Image (cartoon, helix red, strand yellow):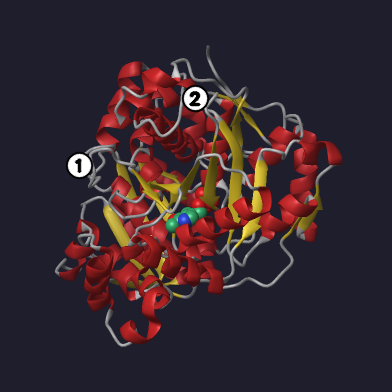
């Protein structure tokens, strides 16, 4: 059955999956959603016999119906290869009564690799399917993590180039080193004199520059973005929930059809929305447990039905969840409004003008699948320490936010269902916060790389290749520019 994608903000837009991937955002400002949520067409026991790549195919083909089998398998095989440091790509680790789904075995040791390693291939395939002759130039402004994951995904992918802007003095030394050592002739990393907002505004202006668009087109290029609202990032994330269920079943931890819960440390609401899609595909998931850090807009939303971004922004030890507007929530709002684009647009307009909106009682009833809670900074550190002392297993700060919310959930509900916790980053990525949590006094004076070695000893886990390589990797990018020079730098890179 052919699936189409509609906009969350009007009824008159209807595109294929490949067109939705190419466009990213709908022209009316809405997000693309499948016209119906597809279901799995293989049994749970069949899934237990499949590799990650095979599960990826049976899940993604249900969403990307205008891709041929060959096209989709080609994308999957190029994405999910030796870039990952474990053969099963997303292993489950049982610790203290829960199953940690490790989504950090890719090139940049965080879960965004799961989607960003396949997005470039989906994008190029989509371009070819829609007779786009131009090369795609990905433009990204980053506060640290997404930029590196996008660089790693797009490096040396034929038919693409990628330019990443970051605030020169606004990322951590390790994050900067990760980016400026990026390999690949099609990559360009540029520091700007300004903060992340300046970088992001600069990129937005470049996207809106019609003259530049024409100039690029004449030279055989067009811009695109890799941000997390693209369905080409959402769909690959459904895969690992299905895969983790199959793994539990294969290992005899659950029986066929037994319901599990899923806990997701949440920022932009992309990862947990993928779990919701997995549930609607027929995967036996009961509760979707949404974990926030001290920026607890989502916890308040699930408890009151009111989404209110008017509050102080907090910098926490789980920075990838420091978000006050969870963009992907719009898709859920649209779905629980009964696919009512007008209603959704009204709420999103209110969010833009007043910074808040309230859903109807009917809509609130449809949130029964979700449980929300949050974790304070002190609880995050305690959770890392406690789990380590009890089991020897070391988790990162984002995962700790989820682990603590799971504890609160069990205490409140006495629910004993088997539970998968999405583990979204390697502890090595946030070594300082993690080691501080374990023993602040002991590790305080160590340098970043000394800490990494200590963590390796403490956790009894080898230093990941992605970190090891950084020690000696040569700097390949040293361009720094003013905000008003960003366009010129892009042109220089493209030879215009
Ligand atoms: C991006 C990110 C998150 C949040 O995921 P969303 O899909 O934005 O909700 C959580 N943890 C880590 C480590 C991340 O990089």
Q: Nearer the viewer, residue 429 or 327?
A: 429
**Furthest residue to the right?**
361
Camera sees residue 207:
no
Instruction: Using residue 81 as the reference point, say whether residue 142 is left or right of it.
Output: right
Q: Nearer the viewer, residue 50 or 448?
A: 50
SS of the residue at dot 2? helix
Q: Residue at (32%, 85%) from the top-left corner? A: 442
* Front: mark 1 or 2: 1
Residue that badge 2 annotates:
63
Give me the residue at 64% from left, 61% from top. Answer: 324
For residue 69, above or below residue 146: above
Q: Residue at x 18, y 70 (%)?
A: 471
Measured from the top left, where is residue 66 in percent x and y? 45, 19
**Direction from residue 287 to residue 71 in the image, left or right:** left
Q: Which percent across, then down, holds residue 466? A: 23, 58
- Residue identifier under label 1: 82
Left or right? Give the position of 483 relative to 439. right
Counting from the top left corner in percent of width and height, residue 341 is at: 74, 34
Q: Quadrant of residue 109?
A: bottom left
Q: Is mark 2 within 8 Å of ligand 1?
A: no
Establish if 25 lies above or below 409: above
Left or right: where 491 falls relative to 63: left
How crowded pointer 2 is (Cα within 10 Å; few <14, some 14-19, many 20+) is rated as: many
């Amino acid at each position: 059955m052919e699936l189409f994608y509609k906009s969350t903000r009007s009824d008159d837009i209807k595109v294929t999956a490949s067109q939705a991937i190419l466009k990213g955002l709908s022209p009316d400002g809405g997000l693309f959603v499948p016209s119906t949520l597809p279901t799995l067409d293989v049994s749970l026991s069949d899934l237990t016999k499949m590799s990650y790549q095979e599960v990826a195919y049976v899940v993604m083909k249900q969403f990307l119906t205008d891709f041929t089998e060959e096209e989709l398998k080609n994308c999957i095989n190029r994405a999910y290869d030796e870039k990952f440091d474990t053969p099963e790509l997303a292993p489950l680790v049982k610790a203290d009564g829960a199953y940690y789904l490790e989504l950090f075995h890719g090139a940049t040791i965080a879960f965004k690799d799961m989607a960003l390693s396949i997005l470039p291939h989906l994008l190029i395939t989509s371009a070819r399917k829609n007779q786009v002759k131009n090369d795609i130039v990905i433009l990204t402004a980053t506060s640290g993590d997404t930029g590196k994951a996008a660089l790693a995904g797009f490096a040396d992918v034929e038919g693409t180039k990628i330019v990443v802007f970051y605030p020169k003095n606004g990322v951590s030394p390790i994050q900067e080193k990760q980016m400026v050592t990026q390999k690949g002739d099609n990559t360009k990393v540029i520091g700007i004199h300004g903060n992340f907002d300046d970088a992001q505004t600069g990129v937005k202006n470049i996207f809106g520059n019609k003259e530049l668009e024409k100039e690029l087109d004449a030279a055989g290029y067009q811009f695109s973005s890799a941000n997390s609202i693209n369905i080409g990032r959402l769909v690959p994330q459904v895969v690992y929930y299905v895969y983790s269920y199959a793994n539990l079943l294969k290992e005899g931890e659950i029986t066929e059809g037994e319901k599990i819960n899923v806990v997701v440390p949440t920022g932009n609401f992309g990862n947990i929305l993928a779990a919701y899609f997995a549930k609607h595909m027929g995967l036996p998931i009961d509760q979707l447990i949404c974990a926030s850090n001290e920026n607890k807009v989502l916890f308040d939303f699930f408890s009151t039905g009111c989404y209110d971004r008017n509050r102080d922004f907090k910098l926490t030890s789980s920075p990838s969840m420091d978000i006050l507007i969870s963009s992907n929530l719009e898709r859920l709002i649209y779905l629980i409004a009964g696919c009512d684009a007008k209603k959704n647009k009204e709420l999103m307009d209110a969010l833009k003008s007043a910074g808040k909106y309230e859903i109807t009682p009917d809509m609130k009833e449809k949130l029964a699948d979700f449980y929300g809670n949050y974790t304070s900074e002190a609880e995050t550190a305690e959770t890392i320490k406690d789990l380590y002392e009890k089991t020897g297993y070391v988790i990162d700060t984002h995962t700790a936010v989820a682990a603590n919310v799971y504890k609160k959930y069990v205490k409140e509900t006495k629910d004993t269902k088997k539970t998968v916790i999405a583990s979204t980053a390697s502890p090595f990525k946030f070594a300082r916060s993690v080691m501080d949590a374990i023993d602040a006094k002991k590790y305080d004076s160590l340098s970043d790389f000394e800490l990494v070695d200590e963590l390796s000893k403490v956790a009894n886990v080898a230093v990941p290749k992605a970190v090891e390589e950084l020690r000696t990797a040569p700097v390949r990018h040293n361009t720094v520019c003013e905000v008003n020079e960003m366009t010129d730098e892009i042109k220089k890179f493209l030879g215009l």
